[in-house]
Structures are given as C-alpha cells and as structure tokens.
Amino acid sequence: GVDVAKLFLPPKARIISEVDRTGRATIYINDGVGSETQLPLYVLVDEKTASASEILTAALQDNHRATVVGPSKTFGKGRIQNVQALPSGSGIAITKAKYLSPSGRDIQSVGIAPDITAKTCAPKDSAMNCLDGVL
C-alpha cells in the first residue's frame, strides 16, 4: 500500500501513520520519486478490500488525490499483527500497532466509505460498469 501510494501522491504527502501500543507513531511520507499527480484517479472498493489496499485507499482519499467508488465500505483491517505458532500446532495473533490514515482515521472494524456509492457494481463487473455514470 505505501509503495503504491508513492506513485500517485505529491512529494511530502503523508501516506499512513503506524502507532504502537505506547502511542509512538511512525509516519510514512512520500519521497516523491515517480509521483504521477495530474491524471484523474478512481479507486474501486468493496467489502473485501482490506489491509494494504485500505492503506492505499485511505492515503489517496485523505490527500484528495482519488475518488473512491464502490457498492459498500471496505473491510476495516487497520491493525498490524504478528502470528506466533504455538507448540500445540495452534497459533496466536499479537496486535503490535494500528494504522491511522493521513487525516487520523482509525479504520479498524469501520472501513472506508466510498465517495460515490456505485449500487450497480458487483465483484464480477468490469471497472467500466462500476464507473458508469461517474466518468
């Protein structure tokens, strides 16, 4: 998500903040290499859009770089977890940090709402069908 966002955001744009349990934040800023900021950009999302795709979507939406289009909000995965295997063969997921969008939104269990709701857009539809009436 972070590296892809760098391709479409202007230099020095905030991409995402990673906040650990102590409140210490690591802020990811675009270094500007290869940034394309002139072309109109639309991001298609649905309830299965999660994790790195949500980082990209939030970065582009909060920086007013893209219009987010879809039939529903995204999944809402805004946590960084380490999965540790246990001797029994089971595992445990430890949450080590959370992501905050450039505007400070915590998307965990909330997701990202589209700017434009495309009610006729289904998972097997083409991008053109989903963007019908938008472009």
Image: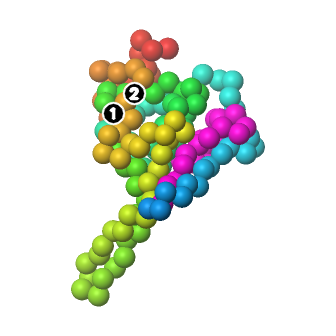
Q: Secondary structure at mark 1?
A: loop
Q: Is residue 125 visible?
A: no
Q: Which residue is mark 1?
A: 73
Q: Mark 1 is on which residue type?
A: Lys
Quarter holding residue 127: top left
Label 1, residues with CA under 10 Å away: few <14, some 14-19, many ≥20 = many
Q: Residue type at mark 2? A: Pro
Query: Residue pushed farthest right?
Result: 33
Q: Is residue 66 at all visible to an observer of this figure? A: yes
Secondary element at image label 2: loop
Q: Quadrant of residue 92?
A: bottom left
| Front-lying residue, 115 or 47 | 115
Magenta stretch holds residue 4: yes
Instruction: Give the camera-side residue of 68 and 130.
Output: 68
Q: Is residue 53 above or below residue 37?
A: below
- Mark 1 or mark 2, earlier in chain: 1
Q: Quadrant of residue 94?
A: bottom left
Q: Residue at x 55, y 54 (%)?
A: 25
User: Height in image: 108 above or below 112?
Assistant: below
Residue positioned 39% across, 42% down in the render: 107
Residue on which disc 2 sits: 114
Instruction: Describe residue 60's horizontal placement relative to residue 109 as left or right.
Output: right
Please report the bounds of the magenta region as a residue range: 1-20
Q: Residue at x 29, y 75 (%)?
A: 91
Q: Is residue 74 rendered to the left or right of residue 98?
A: left
Residue beneath the point at 33% across and 33% down = 73
